[in-house]
Image (tube, grey):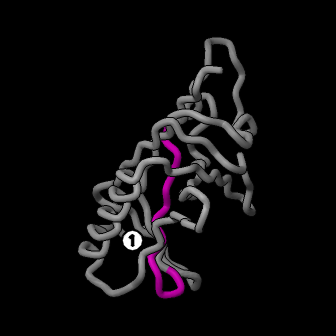
Amino acid sequence: MTTLISNNKYGSFHKLKRPYHLTLVNTSTPFGLQENYNKKIVHWYIKSIDDIKLVRHYQEDLQNILNNNLPINTKITQKDKYPPIIETNISQYIDSNTCISHKDGEIVTYNSIIKGTSGNVFLVCENIVIMDNKVNMVWNINRIVRSSK
């Protein structure tokens, strides 16, 4: 089930009653932090086929919940000769000190997510956006545990 949060001429924003969770173990970002208007975006490699299967399972579950025939965009991109990547957002409500693991006294910002940053990434999909006759899953970064160098 979903709860309608907002609706405008571009589409509708819904909150899932039961969020989906995904943990990417030992992953890295091919591009680092990117900004699109007021959104902070990070793409992550998906190295485990089990993670892709889990997202496909969530996709099927969401299709059953919505009970419509709209295509669902999981935010996974797969291209020949490249590993699959998933597009994730950084919530504006979580500060970098909470989101990114760090040593005591170390100052971290989201700008420290550069190309090649690696570690374990904990994602949550709590919201979906329905627009242009398709459903978009919104994957937010919950926590990044960086690999020690």
Q: On the image, numbered disc 1 is attached to which residue?
A: 4
Query: Could you say where residue 66 lies in the image, as x and y percent from the top left?
Result: 29, 77
Magenta span contains residue 61: no
Residue shown at 47%/82% (left/top)? 134
135 is within the stretch colored magenta: yes
Q: Residue sitting at 74 percent across and 56 percent down?
A: 35
Position of 111 with respect to 61 (left or right) is right
**Left-right relation of 17 to 11:** left
Q: What is the total number of numbered labels drawn onto the structure image?
A: 1
Across and down, in percent, residue 32 comes to 71, 46
Relative to residue 123, is residue 88 drawn left or right? right
In the image, farthest residue toward the top = 104
Q: Is residue 142 left or right of residue 4?
A: right
Residue in the picture at 29% in, 63% down: 57
Q: Is residue 64 above or below residue 109?
A: below
Give the crowd class for mark 1: few <14, some 14-19, many >=20 residues within 10 Å. few
Q: Tag 1: residue type?
A: Leu
Q: Which residues are magenta?
A: 131-143
- Residue 54 vertical placement versus 149 (above, below): below
Residue at x 62% of width, y 15% of height: 103
For the residue pair 29 and 130, the one nearer the viewer reads as 29
Q: Secondary structure at mark 1?
A: strand
Identify the main secondary structure in magenta: strand
Location of residue 85 in the rendering, given as x and y in whole percent from the top left corner? 56, 57
Coordinates of residue 51 in the picture (x, y in percent): 39, 52
Say which quarter of the image contains residue 17: bottom left
Looking at the image, is 2 positioned above or below residue 11? Answer: above
Assign the C terminus to one quadrant of the image: top right
Q: Seen from this angle, which residue lies furthest front?
A: 81
The N terminus: image quadrant: bottom left
